[in-house]
Each structure stands twice: as C-alpha cells, then as structure tokens.
Image (tube, grey):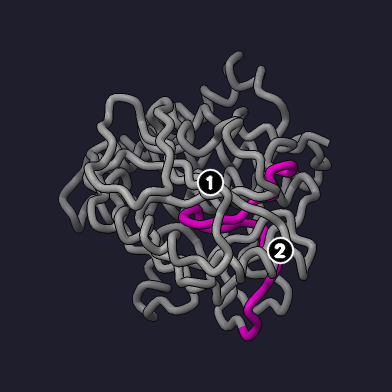
Amino acid sequence: MLTYSVAIRTLGTSGWKFREELLSITRQTIQPEKVIVYIAKGYPRPDFTVGREEYVWVKKGMMAQRILPYDEITSDCILMLDDDVRLAPDSAERMLKAMEEHGADCVGADTFKNHEMSVKAKIYAAVTNLVFPHYSHTWAFKIHRNGSFSYNNSPVHSFYWSQSCAGPASLWRKSVYHQLHLKDELWLDELGFPYGEDVLSFYKLYRNGFRLGILYDSDVENLDGGSSSSAFRKSPQRMYIRTKASFIIWCRTCFHPGNTTAIEQWSAVIGFALKTLWLLFVACGAAVVMRKYSMIPLYLKGWKDGWSFVHSTVYKNIRNYVLK
C-alpha cells in the first residue's frame, strides 16, 4: 500500500480540537511515517504533545502554511489537514484504499456535507453565491463558468470524481502535488484572507488533467475551529475581500486559465456578468436589512480592484493556471 505522512497547518490556537486531532492520528489503523505540524512563525508550540509530531515554523498565512515544498516528507502521499478535524481510526486507510482502487491523484474528505444542509441553508447558498445542488451520477462538485460551484445533492456511492474539494482534509500524491506549481497561487494570501482557496487549489488539479475524488464516508469530522474564518466573517472588509478574490479567481480559473477558446471565454464573461449583477442586488438588499450601507461601495471597490489586479504586471507575470 502507498505510504503517507501527515501535514497540519496551525497557529497553535485551536486548543482541545487540535489535541483531539493529534490523538485521532495515533489511533489510525495504518500509521503515518511522519506527523509534521507547520506552525506560523511568532506563535508558540502548544503545551501538549502526543509524542509523534514534529514542528516546523513557516511564514504565516493559510496559503503559505499549506503550499510548501514538504522537503521533510519522503512518503508517497501527504495527508493535508487543518488543525480542527478528527479522524476515525480507519479514515487514512479508507482514503489510501480509495486512491489506489480508483487511481486518483488526490482524495478529499467530504467534511462540510453540503448535501445534508437544511433547506434554509441551501436556499441561502443559492441566493448569496449561486451555489446550487446537482444530481450527477459522476461528479461530487462541479465548477461552473461563472465561478460558482454546485454539489451532489444525493450521493449514493462512497466515491465520486470531483472538480473541487473542501480543504480541511485531503490526501495528495506528493509527485502530483509538485507538478501543479501551487506556489503561483500564493498571491491570494495578500488579500488579507484567502477567500476561495479551496477552489483555487483543487480546481487546478482537475484543470491540469489530474484525477480528484471525494470520499463521502471517510468519517473525517470537522470540529470547526474557524479562528481565521471567524475573524473574516466579522471583518468590515469582508465584502471587499470576497468580491475582489472572487473576481480574480474567476478570471484565473474560468476566463483565461490558458487553454480556453474565444467561445468559452465569452460564455464565462456572460455567466460572470449575470452573477455579478445578481450579487449586486443581493448586496444592496443585505445593506438595507443589516443597515450596513458601506457594503455597496465595498462590493463595487472589490470588483474594481480585482479588475486592476488582473491587468497588473504582477498578475501577468504569474504562470498560466493550466500548465500543460
């Protein structure tokens, strides 16, 4: 069977959730060769240990702490984890078996369970970001030309192919990970919060011809520490960052990834323009209901600054999203 090591990104502030994660790793039916914790510089090592983990201090940033050379790891695969998940005793074994059985290059755990959301939550996702369910017999998640994703509303099998994936737990073939040049996407950290990082990273795997799968029964539990995302949700700049990031990610992944035809680009433009107009109405409605009228200029400024960035020298010097 393929060998694997665990790579965890953290600030060391998740407390009991991180401890639960480390303990769950010690119970795996197939043990990792290494457990390496990539902690942000300036943050102290947590005061508890389970004896297996090694700490490496790296630059702070959700992208910077995930997109690394991983020189410390020599295993076939890397199980990349956030610091707030708990694995069932056979979670790693299930993911490894799925990778080998299906010939996948990456297997993600379905930690957010979109298909199990309440009707109210599904309507909210549809209204606020045009995220809809689908009923495909092939795909777990699909990325559309307007930049939004859709999710399988009624999966009946444990494994489906996918175009994107949630970030808390994913098993990568190390050789494939290095072929994607994901360091080219570190620009996202510069926005203050890496909104859309999962789509940006995992969709690149799919667009470059590799095979991404979702395992619905991995039994990886998301304990949802959410320290960074919680701060982002409370930030007055949330609308600005979200809008700017969404525009740049759409431009990079859907409009001009490096291998699209003129027809495909126009299709992407029309889809994104309609989405942008719809979300402007949503922003206006939210501003009135919440009495936060700054949301409207922040939305427009995010769109404008996103446009400026994709026409900048910095952006134009980044390699195409589709590398081949």
Is 46 left, or right, of 133 in this rendering?
Answer: left
- Which of 220 and 252 lies nearest the eye of the viewer? 220
Q: Which stretch appears magenta?
A: 156-176
Q: Quadrant of the C terminus?
A: top right
**Which residue occupies the extreme left position in the image?**
291
The answer to whether one can see residue 306 in this image is yes
Rendering coords of residue 306 (x, y %): 49, 30
The answer to whether one can see residue 243 in this image is no
Which residue lies at the image location 30% right of the left edge and 55% below the top edge? 19
Amino acid bearing label 2: Met
Q: Is residue 324 above or below residue 314?
A: below
- Which of 158 and 36 lies nearest the eye of the viewer? 36
Q: Is residue 143 above or below residue 260?
A: below
Confirm whether the magenta stretch covers residue 294: no
Which residue lies at the image location 36% right of the left edge and 72% below the top edge? 121
Which residue lies at the image location 55% right of the left edge and 78% below the top edge? 153
Rendering coords of residue 88 (x, y %): 45, 71
- Bin the neighbour count of mark 1 within 10 Å (Cα to Cα): few under 14, some 14-19, many 20 and up: some
Q: Which residue is mark 1?
A: 34
Q: In which image quadrant can residue 154 be found?
A: bottom right
Look at the numbered disc 2 and give the secondary structure of its residue.
helix
Look at the numbered disc 1 and give the secondary structure of its residue.
loop
